[in-house]
Amino acid sequence: MQIFLNCFILILNPKLSPPVFQLIAGVILSLIISLISYRLKYLTLNGSIAQFFLGSLLFGLGGLKWSVPIIVFFFLSSIISKIRRKYNPGVDSFFEKTGTRDIYQVLANGGIAGLLIIVYQFYSSELLYAVYVSSLAVFCSDTWATEIGTMRKAKTVSVINFKTVDQGVSGGISLAGMFGSLLGAFIIPLSSLSWISKNIFTFMLVVTVAGIIGSLVDSILGALVQAQFKCIICGKITEKKFHCNQNSRLTNGIIWINNDAVNLLAGISGGLFYILLNYLLKI
């Protein structure tokens, strides 16, 4: 515990030590978080390894400024996911993957952050940080829309034609899910306010909107291009290629575009949306 606190202090105030010690502290802190996440089954083994390397970059190079938003996203989303599975576990049959994140989910949700923090070392523009927060707001908005939206049985409609669909189907939206989307998009910029020098209200508004729009992009892509399959045994529409111990049949979308690919594209869209508004409104 003392090691954890010492590492946290170094990241909190890197002026207390040379950058090399902050990097070492970041590596140690990332290792501790990865082990805890694996122990609590928030991450698979390969997901924990990916998180360790990604976390080492963000914690060691970015300090708390870059660490807090992604930690808030990861732990709160994991907790909400665990709670949802207690109340409505049946919806998992629609999802390709469940609440325990693997390497592909870690890279899809954190890969943008890893690239941006590296670029930030050579070009320390605050626009890069805002793009990072915006993309993370998309991931949190989409995740919370899914988890909160399926917490209880609720009417779900397609984002494309608003026809009723089964709860958990890709591209489905609900009132509870929309509330979760708003909450998830809001919590990420809120967690980054300590490091924002521009107008806080404008920043919060633009990033929250970017998060919600990115979440909608995720739903639209999920309905149009994400691979969806039909179980030949029970007839259920699902993201899983294998269901009821049998290979499922592709009914919609492109077979190699899964939920991770859709999440990554949606995250990019959120960052691009912020850049566009930054250019138009001179934020």
Image (spheres, rainbow, N blue to C red):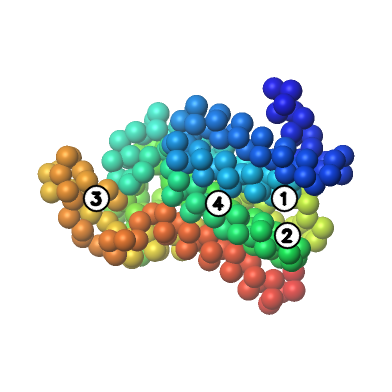
Label placed on residue 157: none
**Label 2 vs 3, first from the N-terminus:** 2
For label 1, the residue is: 62
- Name the image quarter holding residue 211: bottom right
Tell me which residue sits at (17%, 48%) in the image: 247
Residue 258 is situated, as x and y percent measured from the top left of the image, at: 35, 56
Determine whether the residue tagged by mark 3 lies in a helix, strand or loop: loop
Mark 1 and mark 2: span between their CA atoms?
9 Å
User: In this figure, which residue is indicated by the disc labeled 3?
Assistant: 241
Nearest the eye: 200 or 253: 253
The crowd level at tag 2 (other Cα within 10 Å; few <14, some 14-19, many 20+) is few
* Distance Cα–Cα, label 1 vs label 3: 39 Å
Q: Are marks 2 and 4 in contact (CB under 8 Å)?
A: no
Question: Spatial distance from mark 2 to mark 3, Cα to Cα?
Answer: 41 Å
**Taking 229 as reference, is 159 left or right?**
right
Question: What is the residue that sits farthest to the right in this orientation?
Answer: 16
- Name the residue at 78% across, 40% down: 21
Seen in the picture, residue 55 relative to 199 is either above or below; the reply is above
Identify which amino acid the numbered label 2 is placed on: Gln
